[in-house]
Image (cartoon, rainbow, N blue to C red):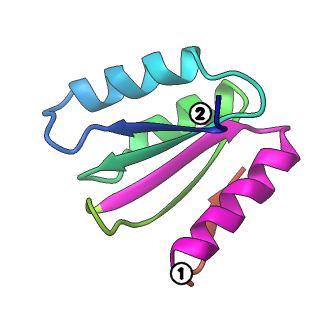
């Protein structure tokens, strides 16, 4: 199984994006990350991610307003992989919150 798991919540209305994301992080295993297309920045999600030990990075999306990446916070290998994916897709600045 490849390390990236993809989730598109672009066309969903609240609270469905949050519900789908929370369900996906419950199933997220070590060594994997979520790549999410979302049409608004999910500010309420950030506190939940921090409490649950996840890290995230967000940037303007190419196929959605935002592209959000989520991984287990202590997984430095996946953090590096996310940074590499973000840089290879385009040379945007990384807005990483841990």
Nearer to us: label 2 or label 1:
1
Label 1 environment density (alpha carbons within 10 Å; few <14, some 14–19, many ≥20): few
Work out which quarter of the rendered image holds the N terminus and state it: top right
- Name the disc covering residue 78, or none: none
Name the element at disc 1: loop
Q: Is residue 90 left or right of residue 65?
A: right
Across and down, in percent, residue 35 comes to: 49, 45
- Expressed as whole percent of the image width and height from the top left, the position of residue 43 reads 41, 46
Of residues 2 and 61, the one nearer the viewer is 2
**Residue 92: mark:** 1
User: Does 47 appear in magenta?
Assistant: no
Percent x, y of residue 2: 64, 36
Mark 2 near mark 1, Cβ–Cβ under 8 Å? no
Of mark 2 and mark 1, the one earlier in the sequence is 2
Q: Residue at x 67, y 56 (%)?
A: 82
Residues rendered magenta in the picture: 66-90
The image shows residue 58, relative to residue 98, as above or below, that is below
On the rendered structure, is 32 left or right of 34? right
| Residue that badge 2 annotates | 49
SS state under label 2:
helix
Q: Quadrant of residue 96?
A: bottom right
Estimate the spatial distance between the alpha carbons at disc 2 and disc 1, rounded to whole Å: 23 Å
């Amino acid at each position: 199984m490849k390390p990236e798991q993809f989730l598109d919540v672009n066309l969903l209305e609240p609270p469905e994006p949050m519900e789908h994301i929370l369900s996906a992080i419950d199933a997220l295993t070590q060594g994997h990350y979520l790549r999410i297309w979302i049409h608004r920045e999910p500010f309420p999600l950030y506190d939940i991610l921090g409490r649950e030990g996840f890290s995230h990075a967000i940037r303007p999306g190419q196929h959605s307003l935002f592209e959000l990446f989520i991984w287990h916070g202590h997984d430095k290998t996946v953090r590096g992989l996310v940074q590499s994916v973000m840089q290879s897709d385009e040379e945007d600045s990384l807005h990483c919150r841990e």
